[in-house]
Image (cartoon, helix red, strand yellow):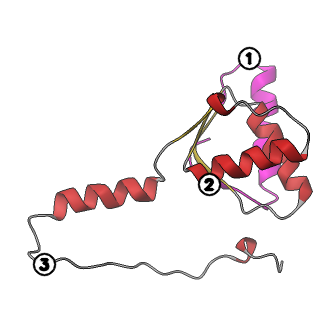
Amino acid sequence: MGGGPLMDLNELFMVEYAFKKAKKLNKITALLGCGVGPLFNRKFRKSVLNISKLSDIVILRDSKSKENLEKIYAEFSEFFNKEGISTSFDPAVECCLQYDKLSSHLAQEKFVAVNLRKFPKEYSKKI
């Protein structure tokens, strides 16, 4: 699974099912560039735990996601192998770095670009 947040969405159970099926078929599984959270509901945290445990490779999009996953492992009294979980740049960070590199010749003065969006309701505890 590449990208996207592992969060309080019912679709998370489809991902868990797919990873279980893949393991039964002896396929390699991976979480690549995913974020962990927000997770307010225990059933979704348990699903994220299961997905993580079913993953042969885990590269999360940032250190906060790794911290969140470690807390989930602790909640369910599971051993968390810090060395087995990697982190990388959030793809949005990579895009910003690439933009900076490609656009350096376009403008003489520095500026700040801010992209705002309304957060989906799933990011709130008030669902």
Residue under pointer 2: 64
Give the residue displayed 72% in from the left and 52% down from the top.
Answer: 68
* Labels 1 and 3 touching (C-beta < 8 A): no
Residue under pointer 3: 109
User: Between marks 1 and 2, how big is the CA–CA gap?
Assistant: 31 Å
Measured as percent of width and height from the top left, residue 73 is found at 82, 41
Where disc 2 sits, the SS reads helix
On residue 74, which mark appears? none
Q: Is residue 15 left or right of residue 75?
A: left
Residue type pointed to by label 2: Lys
Where disc 1 sits, the SS reads loop
Residue type pointed to by label 3: Glu
Q: Is residue 4 above or below residue 49?
A: below
Residue under pointer 1: 26
Of the pair 10 and 105, the residue shown nearer to us: 105
Residue type pointed to by label 1: Asn
Could you classify mark 2 by the number of other residues whose Cα lies within 10 Å: few (under 14), some (14-19), or many (20 or more)?
some
**Residue 53 in sight from this viewpoint:** yes
The residue segment tinted magenta is: 1-29
Q: Earlier in the sequence, mark 3 or mark 2?
A: 2
Q: Is residue 4 left or right of residue 123?
A: left
Report which quarter residue 60 is drawn in: top right
